[in-house]
């Protein structure tokens, strides 16, 4: 795939151009913090700020989404509802790109999920490289997500007054082609890109005290560790860690009947395995009644089960869960402690 | 089909929740299509005593209220507590932490001799309560949901997860990050985290989740600058009747 170059001052016109055909989503400021939102004017887009509160998954898997409409008395066939629109996510970070890959697996491997896949299919992802760690909570380097080779249509890396742009798909290439203002990268640009990448790598430190490939084994050996009870004492079961996580994909399906009592809709909402009701079944039994068991389950999902299922870790090291956790449960510390207890 | 008859009663409260009931405007017409309202001072004068569903607002703060509530319970097939006062005792319970005699003189002034006052309590401290529509004031949508469920013969259910869930879905800035404190992590959701969404802390008006980690949350509040008294005071705003506030 070709390497292109865009002048930084041309980014605003590019965004304006894209806004004609797509809903453009990117990182914006909200009350001094960063969130992904719909870009209303190109100047709003913050390409160089990171650490958003929740992840961009909400554009493929919204917090609440209608799945079908039905008649209470069954007098007409239930109608499936699938909503999607042409959309560009401009400025997705490498960790979120890696997380999107995980969601793609989860929503397509076992039961292909039309609601997710349709939105995903109609979206283009323009990634942006990080210059330095968001803060002390992210550990993407240890999770192997600091660099992504795939999962984007275009990928921007800032170098001096330009962005050096990697094209990841024919669709991404066509986007630049049609805009017409990106030039081919020269030999100097390639040299510059390598230099920028090297400097970047030096700024990120390893947070885990061991090779992450060892993580599933450490977890397995610690299934009965007292650590889970200690964390369970602290955990508020507030669900925040799951809700802000870019790879969590659990949802709950509910029905809502309209006031006329004859029609209704089935919808899904985000769920969280840290909530007390999550593993409760209709008979009233709860498979993970103890808080410590729920905390353990989350870490096993991220560090072991998903790796076994899909070949990659369910944690991309974005640090959002730690930022959101009022009792400071931090995967970096949890994993390092597991290793210590070996 | 006979329309179920609903009666609305009030005890010690500000009548705000009844107003929400009365303010259902368009929706109430549809609700009235399916139910009949027989005893509702806020919006009608006729009284009837043959109701099946009693929606009761307010806390119990006098001996005479205990008797009245027991009569309502005898008549009603289903008793619904409407709003924080009925559901939890609500703000009324703040008085339980003050001198009862002083409270009586403050509230009833020169007529204090005519009235007794007892520590405020929720309806459930006096009679069995079937369902609650929590909140101060109640949420219109939730009131409709409970009404619809009762009409469809389903058990109304409340969320058993904390306000943080709805707060995170709304992608709010956590008020702890703005130097405030919040009861959201232990408070039952269902209000769409309306207070944090508008930049305020959650005061816990919907009551606690079934199994809150109160001890851990008290530590969080302490870490964010509240004294032991400050922590108790924040729980006493709505949870005054419960052990957590004592
Ligand atoms: S954010 Fe923290 S307190 Fe809340 S459920 Fe997750 S680990 Fe527990
Ligand atoms: S577990 Fe935490 S650090 Fe890992 S991907 Fe989820 S939010 Fe990010
Ligand atoms: S719950 Fe709030 S609004 Fe309702 S009666 Fe009590 S004080 Fe008034
Ligand atoms: S503002 Fe309150 S409800 Fe919202 S996340 Fe923070 S603690 Fe939870
Ligand atoms: S956020 Fe808290 S105080 Fe506000 S309405 Fe909801 S439960 Fe009540």
Image: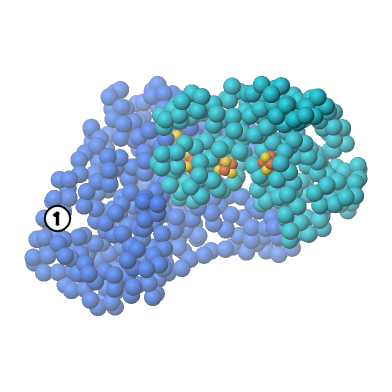
> Who's blue, chain-wise?
A
Q: Is residue A269 left or right of residue A312?
A: right
Q: Residue at x 77, y 29 (%)?
A: B110
The residue under label 1 is A196
Q: Is residue A7 left or right of residue B81?
A: left
**Taking B105 as reference, is A129 above or below it?**
below
* Frontmost residue, A287 versus B90: B90
* Frontmost residue, A244 versus B83: B83
**Taking A38 as reference, is A93 above or below it?**
above
Is residue A274 visible in the rendered structure shown here?
no
**In this structure image, what is the colour of chain B?**
cyan
Q: Quadrant of the N terminus of chain A?
A: bottom left
Q: Quadrant of the C terminus of chain A?
A: top left
Q: Quadrant of residue A204?
A: top left
Chain letter of mark 1 equals A
Please state the horizontal and vertical placement of residue A126, each as a whole percent of the image.
31, 63
**Taking A116 as reference, is A85 above or below it?**
below
Please state the horizontal and vertical placement of residue B45, each as a whole percent of the image.
88, 50
Q: Residue at x 66, y 51 (%)?
A: B141
Label 1 CB less than 8 angstroms from ligand 2: no
**Residue furthest out toward the front:** B110
Q: Residues within 10 Å of mark 1 (few under 14, many from 20)?
A: some
Image coloring type: by chain
Q: Quadrant of residue A69?
A: bottom right
């Amino acid at each position: 795939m070709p390497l292109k170059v865009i002048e930084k001052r041309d980014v605003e016109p590019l965004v304006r151009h894209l806004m004609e055909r797509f809903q453009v989503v990117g990182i914006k400021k909200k009350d001094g913090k960063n969130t992904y939102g719909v870009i209303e004017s190109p100047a709003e887009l913050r390409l160089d700020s990171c650490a958003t509160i929740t992840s961009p998954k909400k554009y493929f898997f919204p917090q609440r989404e209608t799945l079908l409409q039905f008649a209470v008395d069954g007098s007409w066939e239930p109608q499936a509802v699938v909503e999607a629109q042409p959309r560009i996510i401009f400025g997705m970070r490498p960790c979120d790109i890696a997380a999107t890959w995980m969601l793609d697996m989860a929503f397509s491997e076992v039961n292909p999920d039309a609601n997710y896949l349709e939105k995903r299919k109609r979206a283009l992802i323009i990634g942006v490289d990080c210059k330095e760690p968001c803060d002390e909570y992210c550990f993407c380097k240890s999770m192997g997500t600091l660099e992504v080779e795939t999962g984007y249509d275009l990928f921007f890396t800032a170098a001096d007054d330009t962005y050096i742009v990697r094209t990841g798909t024919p669709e991404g290439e066509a986007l630049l082609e049609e805009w017409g203002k990106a030039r081919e990268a020269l030999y100097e640009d390639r040299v510059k890109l390598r230099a920028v990448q090297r400097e970047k790598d030096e700024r990120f430190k390893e947070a885990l005290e061991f090779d992450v490939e060892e993580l599933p084994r450490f977890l397995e050996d610690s299934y009965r560790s007292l650590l889970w009870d200690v964390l369970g004492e602290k955990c508020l079961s507030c669900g925040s860690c799951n809700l802000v996580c870019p790879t969590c994909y659990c949802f709950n399906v509910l029905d809502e009947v309209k006031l006329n009592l004859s029609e209704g809709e089935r919808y899904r909402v985000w769920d969280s395995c840290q909530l007390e009701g999550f593993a409760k079944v209709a008979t009233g039994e709860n498979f993970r009644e103890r808080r410590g068991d729920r905390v353990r389950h989350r870490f096993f999902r991220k560090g072991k089960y998903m790796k076994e299922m899909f070949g990659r870790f369910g944690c991309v090291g974005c640090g959002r869960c730690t930022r959101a956790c009022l009792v400071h449960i931090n995967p970096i510390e949890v994993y390092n402690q597991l290793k210590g207890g070996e | 089909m006979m329309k179920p008859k609903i009666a609305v009663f009030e005890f010690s409260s500000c009548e705000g929740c009844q107003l929400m009931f009365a303010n259902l405007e368009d929706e109430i017409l549809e609700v009235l299509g399916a139910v009949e309202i027989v005893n509702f001072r806020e919006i009608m004068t006729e009284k009837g005593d043959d109701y099946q569903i009693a929606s009761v607002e307010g806390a119990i703060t006098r001996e005479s209220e205990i008797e009245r509530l027991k009569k309502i319970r005898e008549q009603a097939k289903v008793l619904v507590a409407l709003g924080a006062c009925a559901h939890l005792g609500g703000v009324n319970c703040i008085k339980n932490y003050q001198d009862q005699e002083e409270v009586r003189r403050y509230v009833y002034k020169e007529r204090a001799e005519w009235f007794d006052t007892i520590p405020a309590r929720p309806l459930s401290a006096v009679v069995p309560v079937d369902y609650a529509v929590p909140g101060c004031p109640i949420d219109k949508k939730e009131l409709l949901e409970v009404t619809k469920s009762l009409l469809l013969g389903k058990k109304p259910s409340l969320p058993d997860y904390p306000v943080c869930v709805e707060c995170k879905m709304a992608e709010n800035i956590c008020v702890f990050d703005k130097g405030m404190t919040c009861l959201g992590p232990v408070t039952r959701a269902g209000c769409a985290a309306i207070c944090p969404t508008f930049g305020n802390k959650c005061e816990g008006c919907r009551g606690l989740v079934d199994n809150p980690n109160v001890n851990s949350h008290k530590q969080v509040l302490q870490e964010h600058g509240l004294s032991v008294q400050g922590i108790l005071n924040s729980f006493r705003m709505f949870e005054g009747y419960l052990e957590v506030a004592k």
